[in-house]
Amino acid sequence: MTSTELSSILSGPRQSSAPDWFRDLQAKAWEEFEAEPLPTRGNELWRFSSVKNLVLDGYVAPPIYSGDPSALTRPRGFPNPAGRIIFANEALVTAELLNPALEPSGVIFTTLSDALEKHSDLLREHFMTQPARLGSAKFAALHKSVVQAGTFLWIPRGVEIHEPFEVFHLVQGDWTAVFPHTLIIAEDNSRVTLLEHFVSANPEDRGLACGVNDLVLKPGAKLNYVSIQEWSRNFVSVQVNSTVASKDSAALNLALNFGGKYSRLESISRMIDSGARSDMLAISVARGEQEFDQRTLQDHQKPDTTSDLLYKNALHDRSRTIFSGLIKVEPGAHRTDAYQKVRNLLLSDDAEANSMPGLEILADDVRCTHGATSGQVEPEELFYLKSRGIDDLAAKRLIARGFLNEVVDRLPDEQVSGYLHEQIEAGL
């Protein structure tokens, strides 16, 4: 299918009932998308990437979802979420608050379409206001121009919610293109966790996911965002995460990556006032010829801010990972405390890990460290397990699980971390 046919199927705006400002935004974004060239490997922001996967020909709008969505959501669902939204091929299945005590608190947990109608001013202030700086400007513009299925979560000042909210994006059909969006606004001194699942119904379907997250933390807020990516083995995914952390706020962003043929995750954390903290975490389990392409920016804009990045990748077969991350300390951002660590466990002689950590320090009195390691399973560890009757595959699985556990254990909520350990076990 040609790019002209793609235009006729996906051209925006798709939110026909949206306010004028949003339809104008989508129309302008479509022009930006058409003007931006597709990435080339010669571009430093796409170094080592298999950009051949990013050709947009052939993708179509989602068909009507057939079958029972609960067959996919039930085994993956959190036991007692505060609320749940389910999209199946971008059509809303359900959106509900499951904790009745939240209704009088003023919490808003709804779809993007509903929020555009009822909370337009909040969306206009925060919807995709931060630029995509790590290479995916074309895909961010495409997303903005056609986005339809999205989640809006607003937590009022001082409200603390201990159970996580949960969102599912289910996709079915060959060559289906979807554009999931999440906007979370945590007001002053609030606390919230959201789990977001991306799941293909059929393991062989080809498809495209072009998603964006906007995470906005007001002073003193605490926000945990966890994504669990289980696209089919023939899926192409481009996900752009944007976190803006205000004074004394704390953001934790954890990405679990299991599926996809090619999956690119761009994540930017901006610490815009003193006392802000951002924890950027990721786990990727790669098999076959999967490629996980990870690009990050820890942007310290004010003094006395903290960021801590820990990415771990377990690579089987002929899989590949790419990590390119930058800690940037802006002028005047004194007493920045920033860490960046990437570790790759090579479970095959044919696996490949490329790591490019970096620092750009434009202030004084800072503490910034970065590093990347790649290594294979220690023969002694493997021998120890196999000598006790554990076969080679199971032994490597046990070693990989122990290697990955450190990331999930960083979560402050034991119930959520326990749940994620089960998801990793299933992924392994």
Image (tube, rainbow, N blue to C red):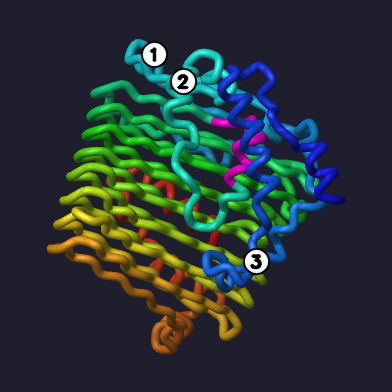
- The quadrant in which residue 178 appears is top right
- Element marked by disc 1: helix
Percent coordinates x, y for residue 365 in the rendering: 13, 63
- The verdict on residue 389 being magenta is no
Count neighbours of disc 1 (C-alpha within 10 A) and say few if under 14, some if 14 to 19, many if 20 or more.
few
Callout 1, which amino acid?
A: Glu
Nearest to the observer: residue 26 or residue 394:
26
The mark lying in front, picked from 1 and 3, is 3
Judged left or right of residue 248, residue 413 is right
Q: CA distance from mark 2 to mark 3?
A: 44 Å
Read off the residue under disc 3: 40
Note whether residue 240 is visible.
yes
The mark lying in front, picked from 2 and 3, is 3
Nearest to the observer: residue 202 or residue 92:
92
Count neighbours of disc 3 (C-alpha within 10 A) and say few if under 14, some if 14 to 19, many if 20 or more.
some
- The verdict on residue 147 being magenta is yes
Callout 3, which amino acid?
A: Thr
Of the residues under marks 2 and 1, which one precedes in the sequence? Answer: 2
Query: Mark 2 near mark 1, Cβ–Cβ under 8 Å?
Result: yes
Read off the residue under disc 1: 103
Percent coordinates x, y for residue 316 in the rendering: 57, 74
User: In percent of the image, x 55 and y 25: which residue is there?
Assistant: 112
Magenta extent: 140-150
Q: CA distance from mark 1 to mark 3?
A: 49 Å
- The quadrant in which residue 11 appears is top right
User: In percent of the image, x 40 and y 34: which residue is there?
Assistant: 164
Callout 2, which amino acid?
A: Leu
